[in-house]
Image: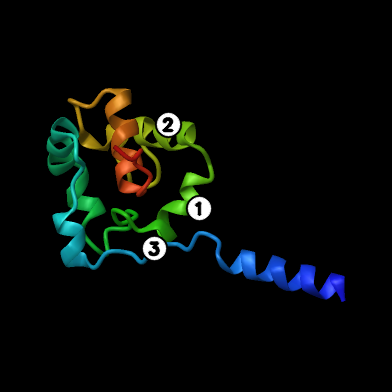
């Protein structure tokens, strides 16, 4: 009997785990931008064209289902892919004004992993 109670409690807790939020609609994606003004400007000029437009092959901004497998590779890998270029992603995402810290902030924003303010 104790085993059954323990199993039910474990299943109940597992059901309370973090759920992936739904991806934004294309209309919502166009309105998203980083809270930091500098990053918002960089995002508007370099990232948004691909990451807020469906069908480009780029993971959509705040689409955790698309970003989570990439995120699991680690931020260092994502940063390297951004700086070096990866598949259809051009080197530096065509952002000549971006420093590595900017890329890191932009990746976190697009992946929906920003640090809460």
Q: Residue at x 40, y 41 (%)?
A: 86
The numbered dot on residue 21 is 3
Mark 2 → mark 3, Cα distance in angstroms: 26 Å
The numbered dot on residue 69 is 1
Which sits earlier in the primary sequence, circle 2 or circle 3? 3
Asked if the residue under mark 1 is in contact with the one under mark 3, i.e. CB atoms within 8 Å, the reply is: no
Q: Residue at x 43, y 61 (%)?
A: 65
The C terminus, quarter of image = top left
The residue beneath circle 2 is 80
- What is the x, y in percent for residue 60? 30, 57
Of marks 2 and 3, the one in the foreground: 3
Q: Residue at x 47, y 31 (%)?
A: 76
Quick check: 48 above or below 4?
Answer: above
Quick one: SS at disc 3?
loop
Is disc 1 surrounded by few (<14), some (14 to 19) or many (20+) residues within 10 Å?
few
Of marks 3 and 1, the one in the foreground: 3
Which sits earlier in the primary sequence, circle 3 or circle 1? 3
- What is the x, y in percent for residue 97? 17, 25
Q: How many marks?
A: 3
Looking at the image, residue 37 sits to the left or right of residue 59; the answer is: left
Of marks 2 and 1, the one in the foreground: 1
Q: Residue at x 87, y 76 (%)?
A: 1
Looking at the image, residue 2 sits to the left or right of residue 30; the answer is: right
Is disc 3 surrounded by few (<14), some (14 to 19) or many (20+) residues within 10 Å?
few
Q: Where, by quadrant of the figure, is residue 114 drawn?
A: top left
Mark 2 → mark 1, Cα distance in angstroms: 16 Å
Q: Where, by quadrant of the figure, is residue 101 drawn?
A: top left
- What is the x, y in percent for residue 15? 59, 69
Visual colour scheme:
rainbow
């Amino acid at each position: 009997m104790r085993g059954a109670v323990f199993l039910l409690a474990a299943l109940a807790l597992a059901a309370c785990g973090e759920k992936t939020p739904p991806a934004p609609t294309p209309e919502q994606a166009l309105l998203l931008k980083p809270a930091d003004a500098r990053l918002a400007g960089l995002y508007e000029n370099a990232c948004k064209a691909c990451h807020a437009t469906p069908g480009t092959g780029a993971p959509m901004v705040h689409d955790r289902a698309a970003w989570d497998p990439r995120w699991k590779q680690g931020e260092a890998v994502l940063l390297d892919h951004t700086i070096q270029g990866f598949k259809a992603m051009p080197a530096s995402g065509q952002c000549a004004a971006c420093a590595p810290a900017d890329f890191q902030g932009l990746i976190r924003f697009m992946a929906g992993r920003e640090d809460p303010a």
